[in-house]
């Protein structure tokens, strides 16, 4: 089991979001930029919160923005957005949010597997603060355990 792809295009660090909708929109735009989704997926992620509330705030400081698989998901993908100033989603215990992880999957099985893999990452109490303080894509990849990509980029070209 492994996480969906997280290309550099799907990482935005230190963005300024005025509210939770803007934060989710950043995560959705990053998914779209990476080629994982169409723009309509971002609207569906926002609708999930409108309909079901802030349950996507799964840990202190961390939101997992997602929607069901649909025709606007082109391929499985992740995005990571860190916020310059944390925003409130309306969760009774885990607000404010400083890291938004966007998740797009093409099948229900991929959803279950991806959430389980992310849960493993975020079992480490240092993972969320490390993401919040990341200054590069390599930092994000290391926290998420995508070491191969981080190691490849850290190696000087021959």
Image: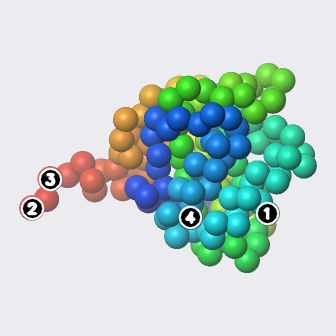
Mark sitting earlier along the chain (4/2): 4
Which residue in the protein does label 3 denote?
Answer: 156
| Distance (Cα) linking label 2 and label 1 | 43 Å
Quarter of the image with the C terminus is bottom left
Quarter of the image with the N terminus is bottom right
Mark sitting earlier along the chain (4/3): 4
> Helix, strand, or loop for circle 2?
loop
Mark sitting earlier along the chain (1/4): 4
Mark sitting earlier along the chain (1/3): 1
* Disc 3 and disc 2 in contact, CB within 8 angstroms: yes
> Helix, strand, or loop for circle 1?
loop
Q: Which residue is rendered at x = 79% and y = 63% of the image? A: 68
| Distance (Cα) linking label 4 and label 3 | 30 Å
Near mark 1 (Cα within 10 A), the count class, few <14, some 14-19 or many ≥20, is some
Percent across and percent down for residue 154 are 24, 48
Q: Which residue is rendered at x = 72% and y = 28% of the image? A: 88
Which residue in the protein does label 2 denote?
Answer: 158
> Helix, strand, or loop for circle 4?
helix
Near mark 2 (Cα within 10 A), the count class, few <14, some 14-19 or many ≥20, is few
Front label number (4 vs 2): 4
> Would residue 57 be found to the left or right of residue 97 on screen?
right
| Distance (Cα) linking label 1 and label 4 | 16 Å
| Distance (Cα) linking label 3 and label 2 | 6 Å
> Would residue 113 be found to the left or right of residue 126 on screen?
right
| Residue at the outermost right position | 51
Q: Which residue is rendered at x = 14% and y = 53% of the image? A: 156
Percent across and percent down for residue 67 are 76, 58
Residue 32 is labelled as 4
Q: Which residue is rendered at x = 76% and y = 68% of the image? A: 69
Which residue in the protein does label 1 denote?
Answer: 68
| Distance (Cα) linking label 1 and label 3 | 40 Å
| Distance (Cα) linking label 4 and label 2 | 33 Å
């Amino acid at each position: 089991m492994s996480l969906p792809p997280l290309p550099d295009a799907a990482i935005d660090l230190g963005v300024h979001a005025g509210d939770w909708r803007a934060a989710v929109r950043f995560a959705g735009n990053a998914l779209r930029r990476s080629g994982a989704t169409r723009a309509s997926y971002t609207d569906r992620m926002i609708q999930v919160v409108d309909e079901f509330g802030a349950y996507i705030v799964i840990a202190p400081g961390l939101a997992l923005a997602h929607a069901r698989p649909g025709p606007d998901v082109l391929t499985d993908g992740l995005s990571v957005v860190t916020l310059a100033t944390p925003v409130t989603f309306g969760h009774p215990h885990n607000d404010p949010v400083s890291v938004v992880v966007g998740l797009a999957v093409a099948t229900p099985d991929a959803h279950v597997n991806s959430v389980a893999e992310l849960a493993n990452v975020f079992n480490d109490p240092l993972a969320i603060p490390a993401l919040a303080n990341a200054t590069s894509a390599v930092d994000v990849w290391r926290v998420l355990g995508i070491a191969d990509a981080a190691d490849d980029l850290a190696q000087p070209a021959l």
